[in-house]
Image (cartoon, helix red, strand yellow):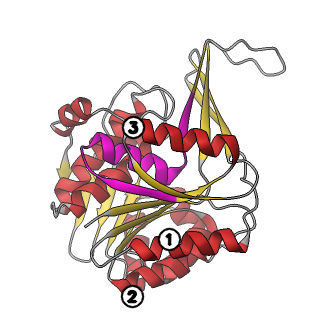
Amino acid sequence: MMIYTVTLNPAVDKTIKLKNLVVDHVNRAEEVREDAGGKGINVSKMIKNLMGESEALGLCAGKTGEFIQHQLDEMGIKHHFIQGEGQTRTNIKIVDDLNKTYTDINETGAPVSKETMQALEELIFSKLTQDDFLVLAGSVPANVSKDIYKNWIQRANEIGAKVILDADGQLLEQGLEAGPYLIKPNIHELETLYNKEIKTIEEAIMLAKDLFKNKIEVIVISRGEHGCVVVTKDETLMIEGLKVPVKSTVGAGDSMVAALAYALNNKDSLKEAITLGVAASAASVMQEGTIMGEWDTIQSLKEKVNVTN
């Protein structure tokens, strides 16, 4: 059993740390770092930190694409990227120490040819087998159809693989129709799906349960610092957020997805999986930039996670 992560829109995440961001003024960076990023890549990075194995698949282009692949090589993460056109995007993450703000400026990503997309699809489904996990995460280049995840979920289901979908907007809405194994929407994404304001967690759970009509098995409702709720047809688990010092929120959700994929691939219980997920997410917000949480920190935080029915 293998975990495959797919990143259609990878990025070099450039984190700029400032003492105090002042709009309309020249600001001097105190610290700058560059990391291989994109949601699927972040998932693979966290799985590596959990002592697990995955293979990162996706699209890369130009010098920034080469940088991403070189960094993954240095981390010892198995990967296979189809070479696309143009340049892989660069995303700017601005960390303001004084005001404790985290501002993202994300590029949309260069257009991708039909031939490149076809080559990636052939790569994915030449590898995927029954009982593998396929993580489809993040945005897609602007010219890629928003039903791409839906189509791939359908193909994966036919094979017998389990798909974890972590996307928003039309990618999520259409992907749901194909019945992924697990989704991780936040409250805002649920509100968008149902076009209504959600005022209580009980209301969010009720709306989540409506999604079981699409043959989804696990729904993790992300609540940021307030924790999360796991909903299945048989049980509902409430998990409190962990109070930790925050250095960057980038990659927190990806860390949770990674831990869930890793634990469920190891046949751990759902309670064990979400405990690891909350600990991994908290460990990552304690790190600068898109550095994933460390093994020792995750293990210590696991002891503090409180899961109730």
Question: What separation in Å lies between label 1 and label 2 (alpha carbons)?
Answer: 17 Å
What's drawn in magenta, residue-wise? 34-57
Task: Name the residue nearer the viewer: 78 or 296.
Answer: 78
Task: Name the residue nearer the viewer: 41 or 20.
Answer: 41
Which disc, if any, is residue 75?
A: 3
Q: Circles 3 and 1: CB distance less than 8 Å?
A: no
Q: Circles 3 and 2: CB distance less than 8 Å?
A: no
Task: State the quadrant of the C terminus.
Answer: bottom left
Q: Residues within 10 Å of mark 3 (few under 14, many from 20)?
A: few
Question: What separation in Å lies between label 3 and label 1 (alpha carbons)?
Answer: 22 Å
Quick one: label 3 or label 1, which is nearer the N terminus? 3
Q: Name which residue type carries label 1.
A: Leu
Q: Residues within 10 Å of mark 1 (few under 14, many from 20)?
A: some
Residue 68 belongs to the span the image colors magenta:
no
Dot 2 falls on a residue whose secondary structure is helix
Q: Name which residue type carries label 2.
A: Glu
Task: Name the residue nearer the viewer: 256 or 132.
Answer: 132
Q: Circles 1 and 2: CB distance less than 8 Å?
A: no
Which disc, if any, is residue 123?
A: 1
Q: Which residue lies under the disc numbered 2?
A: 158
- Could you say where residue 176 lies in the image, as x and y percent from the top left? 49, 77
- Could you say where residue 129 lies in the image, as x and y percent from the top left? 33, 77
Quick one: label 1 or label 2, which is nearer the N terminus? 1
| Rendered view: 98 above or below 234 | above
| The image quarter in which residue 134 lies | bottom left
- Could you say where residue 163 lies in the image, as x and y percent from the top left? 39, 71
Question: What separation in Å lies between label 3 and label 2 (alpha carbons)?
Answer: 33 Å
| Rendered view: 192 above or below 56 | below
